[in-house]
Image (cartoon, rainbow, N blue to C red):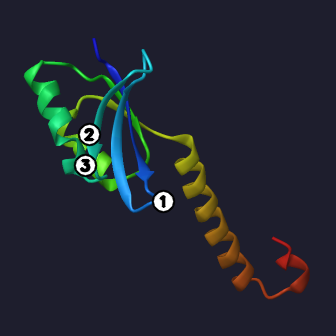
Amino acid sequence: GLRCIGIDEFAVHKGQIYKTIVVDHETGRIVYVGNGRSKEAFAKFWRRVKRLKVKIEVVSSDLSAAFISSVGQNAPDAIHVYDKFHIVQLVAKAMDKTRRSVYKQTTDMEQRKV
């Protein structure tokens, strides 16, 4: 049965229209496509999961607030894994912010090589 899913959104028509997709990670099969990228975009999917008594164990997604909230509400016991690209992006931004802060605080020009 369905245990491990991936949730993502994709743009249709050059970014003006979005769809949300749910994929079975074990089979690679698309199990749901919804309109939009909000929590409501895949509410029908979660209703079907509950009706069929499916136990989702692992979910992967990006850091979309809608995805995080929806998974937390509908699969609270599932392990929620965030994709590497977005995590690396957050870490890089945090490091850059720290580097800029240290640079501004350093008065010695030789030590400014951060």
Q: Callout 3 environment at 10 Å: few (<14), some (14 to 19), or many (20+)?
A: some
Where disc 2 sits, the SS reads helix
CA–CA distance between discs 2 and 3? 6 Å
- Image check: 61 left or right of 65? right
Mark 1 and mark 2: Cα distance apart in space:
27 Å
Q: Along the horizontal axis of the image, is 3 left or right of 74?
A: right
Identify the residue at image location x=88%, y=85%.
109
Q: Quadrant of the C terminus?
A: bottom right
Could you say where residue 48 lies in the image, as x and y percent from the top left? 14, 27
Per the image, the residue denoted by label 3 is 69
Is 93 left or right of 76, judged from the image as shown? right
- Image marks 2 and 3: residues in contact by CB distance under 8 Å: yes
Crowding at dot 1, Cα within 10 Å, few <14 / some 14-19 / many 20+, comes out as few
Q: Seen from this angle, which residue lies furthest front?
A: 13
Query: From the viewer's perspective, is the residue at label 3 or at label 1 nearer?
Result: 1
Q: Which mark is residue 37?
A: none
- Give the mark nearest the N terminus, 1 or 2: 1
- Specify the amino acid type for callout 2: Val
Q: Please give the name of the residue rendered at 65% of the width and 78% of the height, measured from the top-left corner.
A: 101
Which percent across, then down, holds residue 112?
A: 83, 79
Given the image, on which type of amino acid does mark 1 rest? Lys
Q: Are marks 3 and 1 in contact (CB under 8 Å)?
A: no
How far from the left and from the top, in percent, is residue 22? 34, 33
Q: Which residue is mark 2?
A: 71
Position of residue 108 in the picture relative to residue 59 (left or right):
right
Classify mark 1: helix, strand or loop: loop
